[in-house]
C-alpha cells in the first residue's frame, strides 16, 4: 500500500493510470508510466511477482528513439492492458539502459526467426527463460497474421497446457545460444595470412556493393555505417604505401563521394547540423529523423579523416557542423553529452499526436515567407517545391506522409548555382547561411522532438574521441577559411575543452574510484546497470585520443586503469576475447562475445585497437601482455574474419594494425601546453596515418615524468636527454630507431609524410 501511495504522489492527478515506471529515471520508461498496463522495470520485484503468481512474463524492449506504434495501438488500450495485467507480469526495458538484457532476448528472436528488430516482444517463464517471441504485433488479426490479443491468449493457453515443453525448450535455447556466443580459440593467435586476406576481402565486398551513382554501400534504406568508411580509408592508405596507387585512389574516391552524398542529402540536418539515423530511400534524402549520439561521434571522425587526407574544407566543415550541433543542443551544464533526439514531434503546440519529421520539414510557402528575397535561390539550392520534394524515389514517401512538405537536399553544384545568381562562391554561401539562420530561428519555436538526456558512457566515449581529434586536425584548415551557419567557426582548441569536460563528468559521476568500475549511464544519478564492455572500450579509446591529441597525461593514466578493470571483468583468460557483461547479474542469462561492427563498432574490435595503441606506449611485460590479449582475441573470431569479413570491418583493420611489424611513434619532448607545443602536436596529426602513436612529455612536469618512469623508461630517458629544454623537440621512431630531432612543424610533417622505401621509385 505504501508503494502505491508513493507512485500516486509522484504523478499528476490528471492521469488515469500510474505504474511502477513512474519511479524510474529512463526517459523511455517514464513515457510508459501512465499506460493502463501495470508495467514493472527489469528487476527482482517483477521476477518475484511472476513466481508468486506462477504466470509468464511479457518483456517489451525498445530504444527510446524508435517510433512507439505498439504503445499507441496496444499498451494504451484498456482491453489489451487487462489481458496483460490478468495473465502476465509485464516488464518494460529501455534497450539503451539495459543492452545486456535486450541482447539475450533479441538473440533468441533472431535465432528463432532468422531476423529481429524493435520493438522486441518476448514471453518468459518466471525463471526468465524465453518461451516465445517476436517484434511488432498489430493489435488485431489482420492479413492472415495473428494480432497481439490473439498472441496473448495463445501464450496463456500454452502455459496452462504445455508448460513443461515450453520451459524445457527455453532452457535448451539458452544453453545452445550460450555455447554459440561464447566461442573460444583453439590457438593463441590468428593463422598466418588471415589478416591480409580479411582486409582485402572486406574492401572488395564493399566495393562490389558500392552505389556509383548515389554513393553508399548497398541500396535503400541507406545507413551511414562509419566502420565501413573507416575500413575503406584504411585499406586505401595501405594500398598507397604498397605502391598500388590506382587501386588506393579508387577506394578513396568511393569514400569521398559517399561522404559528399550524405552531407548533401536530407539525412543531414542542413538547418541545425548533425545527421539523422538513416535514409529510407537510395538518395540519402528522406531520413528516419532521430539523431543518435553514436552516429555523430563516428561520422565526425570519418569526416575529419577525409579532411586530413584531402585538405578539402568541405569535409572539415561537415565535421564542425556535427560537433557544433552537439555543443549547441546535446550538452548538459556539467559537460555531459546526451544520447538522442527523437524522430517524432507535434506539428503544432497542443497537438495530441506526434508525427515523424514535423520539426524538420518545410512547405515552400514557409520558406518563401521566412527567407524573403532569396527564396528562389534557396529553393533551387535545396530542391524545394510547392508540391513537396519527397518524390525522388518510390521509397521516399510511400504513404504520402510528407505530401506538400520538403526535406532539404542539395542536388546542384554550388559553383554553377553561384554563377547562375551572379555571385561569387563566398557570397553565395553567405546568403545560404543567412537563410539557414532565419529558418533555424523559426524552427526553434516549433514543438521540439523529445530529448533523451540520458548520458551513456560508451556513446560519450565516441564523441570525446571526435572532439579531441578535431582540436588538432582542424588546425590544418587554410587561414581565412570562412564558415556559415550552423557552423560556429570557433578555434579548434575549444573542442578539446569539450572533450575534457565530458570525460571529467564521467569520472566524477559514473566512476567509482575505490572499485575502479564504471556505471553504464546517468540520468538524475547513475543507473543501476553496471558498465558493459562497450562502455570501457569506447571510453578508453576516447581517452587515448584525448591524450594523443594534446590532453593531459592523467587521461592516459586513467585509460590504463580502465583497461586493467576491463580485463578483470570481461576478459576470457582461457578462451580469449571479451564478454559483453561481467557475468555478475544472475538475471542476465547469456554472456556474449560480440563481434559485429554495425551502427556501433563491437567492443572487441575497439579493444584490439586500444590494446595495440597501449602496447606501443608502455614497455616490457605490460606491453607484451596487451599484445598477447589482442592476438588471443582475434583468434576467437578467426572464422568470422575468414568467412564474413564484411560483418567485421573494424576488426579487419584492428587485425592489420596488430600485424604491422613496427608501429610508428612520434615522441614530443618539451614544455606544454603552449603555442609551440600545440603547433607541433597538430603537425604530428596533420596527415592520415592510422598506424602511429603520438607521445608527448614535459620534462619539467612531475606528473609526466613519474608516469613515464613507471610505464616506459625509454620515453623518460628521451625526455631527460632532450637537446633543447626550452623548445618542443620531436622524434619519429620506428623499428627501434629514431630520427634526428626536429623542432619545427613543417620538418615534422615532412618526416611523417616520407613514403616507405619500396614506394619511392
Image: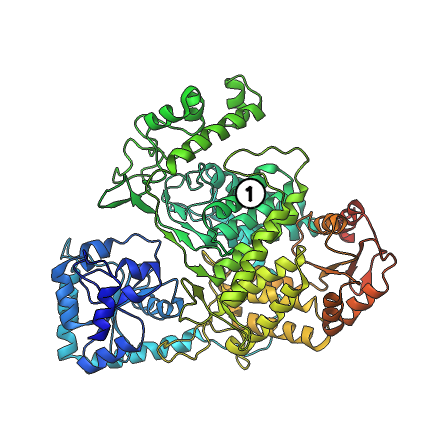
Q: Residue furthest top?
A: 422
User: Which residue position holds label 1?
Assistant: 320
One can see residue 246 in this view: no
Image point (67%, 42%), residue name: 476
Residue 669 percent location from the top left of the image: 79, 59
Image point (41%, 62%), residue name: 523
Residue 192 percent location from the top left of the image: 63, 69
Neighbours of disc 1 within 10 Å: few (<14), some (14-19), many (20+): many
Count of numbered labels shown in the rendering: 1
Q: Quadrant of the N terminus?
A: bottom left
Q: Secondary structure at mark 1?
A: helix
Q: Residue furthest right?
A: 723
Image point (64%, 73%), residue name: 626
- Of residue 91 and residue 110, the one placed in the foreground of this image is 91
Instruction: Left or right? Give the position of 156 relative to 626.
Output: left
Residue 30 percent location from the top left of the image: 30, 60
Instruction: Left or right? Give the position of 54 relative to 451.
Output: left
Image quadrant assignment for residue 454 = bottom left
Instruction: Left or right? Give the position of 284 relative to 713.
Output: left
Instruction: Give the vertical position of 401 relative to 153 (above or below).
Output: above
What scheme was used to colour the molecule? rainbow
Instruction: Left or right? Give the position of 234 relative to 727.
Output: left
Instruction: Give the vertical position of 372 relative to 217 (above or below).
Output: above
Image point (41%, 38%), residue name: 266
One can see residue 17 in this view: yes
Image quadrant assignment for residue 117 = bottom left
Residue 356 percent location from the top left of the image: 30, 44
Amino acid at each position: 500500500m505504501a508503494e502505491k501511495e508513493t507512485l500516486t504522489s509522484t504523478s499528476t492527478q490528471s492521469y488515469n493510470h500510474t505504474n511502477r515506471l513512474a519511479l524510474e529515471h529512463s526517459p523511455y520508461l517514464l513515457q510508459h508510466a501512465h499506460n493502463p498496463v501495470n508495467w514493472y522495470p527489469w528487476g527482482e520485484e517483477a521476477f518475484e511477482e511472476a513466481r508468486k503468481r506462477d504466470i509468464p512474463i511479457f518483456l517489451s524492449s525498445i530504444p527510446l528513439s524508435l517510433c512507439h506504434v505498439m504503445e499507441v495501438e496496444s499498451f494504451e488500450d484498456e482491453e489489451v492492458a487487462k489481458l496483460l495485467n490478468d495473465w502476465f507480469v509485464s516488464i518494460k526495458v529501455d534497450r539503451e539502459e539495459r543492452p545486456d538484457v535486450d541482447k539475450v532476448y533479441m538473440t533468441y528472436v533472431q535465432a528463432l526467426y532468422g531476423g529481429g528488430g524493435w520493438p522486441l516482444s518476448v514471453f518468459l517463464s518466471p525463471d526468465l527463460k524465453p518461451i516465445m517471441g517476436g517484434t511488432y504485433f498489430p493489435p488485431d488479426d489482420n492479413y492472415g497474421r495473428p494480432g497481439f490479443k490473439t498472441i496473448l491468449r495463445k501464450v496463456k493457453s500454452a502455459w496452462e497446457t504445455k508448460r513443461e515443453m515450453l520451459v524445457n525448450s527455453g532452457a535448451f535455447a539458452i544453453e545452445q545460444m550460450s555455447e554459440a556466443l561464447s566461442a573460444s580459440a583453439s590457438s593463441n593467435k590468428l593463422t598466418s595470412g588471415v589478416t591480409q586476406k580479411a582486409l582485402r576481402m572486406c574492401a572488395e565486398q564493399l566495393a562490389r556493393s558500392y552505389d556509383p551513382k548515389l554513393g553508399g554501400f548497398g541500396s535503400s534504406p541507406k545507413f551511414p555505417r562509419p566502420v565501413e568508411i573507416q575500413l575503406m580509408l584504411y585499406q586505401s592508405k595501405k594500398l598507397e604505401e604498397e605502391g598500388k596507387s590506382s587501386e588506393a585512389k579508387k577506394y578513396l574516391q568511393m569514400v569521398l563521394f559517399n561522404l559528399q552524398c550524405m552531407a548533401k542529402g536530407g539525412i543531414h540536418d542542413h538547418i541545425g547540423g548533425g545527421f539523422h539515423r538513416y535514409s529510407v530511400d537510395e538518395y540519402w534524402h528522406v531520413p528516419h529523423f532521430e539523431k543518435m549520439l553514436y552516429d555523430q561521434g563516428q561520422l565526425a571522425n570519418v569526416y575529419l579523416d577525409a579532411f586530413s587526407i584531402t585538405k578539402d574544407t568541405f569535409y572539415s566543415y561537415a565535421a564542425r557542423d556535427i560537433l557544433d550541433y552537439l555543443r549547441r543542443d546535446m550538452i548538459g551544464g556539467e559537460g555531459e553529452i546526451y544520447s538522442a533526439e527523437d524522430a517524432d514531434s507535434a506539428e503544432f503546440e497542443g497537438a495530441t499526436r506526434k508525427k515523424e519529421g514535423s520539426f524538420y520539414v518545410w512547405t515552400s510557402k514557409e520558406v518563401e515567407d521566412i527567407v524573403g528575397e532569396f527564396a528562389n535561390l534557396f529553393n533551387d539550392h535545396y530542391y524545394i517545391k510547392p508540391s513537396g520534394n519527397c518524390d525522388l524515389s518510390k521509397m521516399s514517401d510511400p504513404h504520402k506522409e510528407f505530401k506538400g512538405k520538403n526535406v532539404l537536399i542539395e542536388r546542384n553544384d554550388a559553383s554553377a548555382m553561384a554563377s547562375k545568381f551572379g555571385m561569387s562562391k563566398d557570397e553565395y554561401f553567405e546568403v545560404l547561411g543567412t537563410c539557414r539562420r532565419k529558418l533555424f530561428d523559426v524552427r526553434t519555436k516549433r514543438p521540439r522532438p523529445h530529448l533523451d538526456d540520458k548520458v551513456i558512457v560508451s556513446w560519450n566515449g565516441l564523441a570525446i574521441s571526435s572532439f579531441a581529434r578535431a582540436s588538432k586536425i582542424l588546425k590544418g584548415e587554410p587561414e581565412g577559411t570562412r564558415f556559415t551557419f550552423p557552423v560556429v567557426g570557433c578555434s579548434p582548441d575549444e573542442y578539446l575543452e569539450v572533450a575534457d569536460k565530458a570525460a571529467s563528468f564521467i569520472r566524477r559521476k559514473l566512476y567509482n574510484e575505490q572499485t575502479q568500475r564504471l556505471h553504464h549511464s546517468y540520468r538524475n544519478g547513475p543507473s543501476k546497470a553496471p558498465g558493459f564492455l562497450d562502455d570501457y572500450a569506447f571510453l578508453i579509446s576516447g581517452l587515448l585520443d584525448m591524450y594523443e591529441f594534446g590532453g593531459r597525461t592523467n587521461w592516459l593514466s586513467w585509460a590504463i586503469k580502465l583497461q586493467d578493470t576491463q580485463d578483470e571483468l570481461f576478459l576470457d583468460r582461457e578462451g580469449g576475447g571479451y564478454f559483453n557483461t561481467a557475468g555478475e547479474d544472475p538475471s542476465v542469462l547469456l554472456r556474449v562475445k560480440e563481434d559485429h561492427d554495425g551502427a556501433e563498432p563491437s567492443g572487441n574490435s575497439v579493444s584490439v585497437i586500444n590494446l595495440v595503441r597501449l602496447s606501443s606506449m608502455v614497455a616490457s611485460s605490460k606491453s607484451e601482455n596487451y599484445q598477447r590479449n589482442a592476438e588471443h582475441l582475434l583468434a576467437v573470431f578467426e572464422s568470422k574474419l575468414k568467412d564474413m569479413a564484411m560483418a567485421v570491418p573494424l576488426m579487419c583493420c584492428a587485425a592489420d594494425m596488430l600485424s604491422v611489424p613496427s608501429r610508428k611513434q612520434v615522441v614530443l619532448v618539451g614544455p606544454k601546453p603552449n603555442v609551440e607545443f600545440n603547433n607541433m602536436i597538430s603537425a604530428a596529426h596533420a596527415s592520415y596515418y592510422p598506424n602511429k602513436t603520438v607521445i608527448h612529455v614535459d620534462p619539467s612536469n612531475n606528473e609526466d615524468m613519474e608516469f613515464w618512469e613507471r610505464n616506459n623508461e625509454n620515453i623518460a630517458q628521451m625526455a631527460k636527454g632532450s637537446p633543447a629544454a626550452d623548445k618542443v623537440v620531436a622524434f619519429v621512431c620506428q623499428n627501434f630507431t629514431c630520427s634526428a630531432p626536429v623542432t619545427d612543424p613543417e620538418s615534422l610533417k615532412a618526416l611523417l609524410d616520407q613514403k616507405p622505401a619500396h614506394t619511392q621509385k
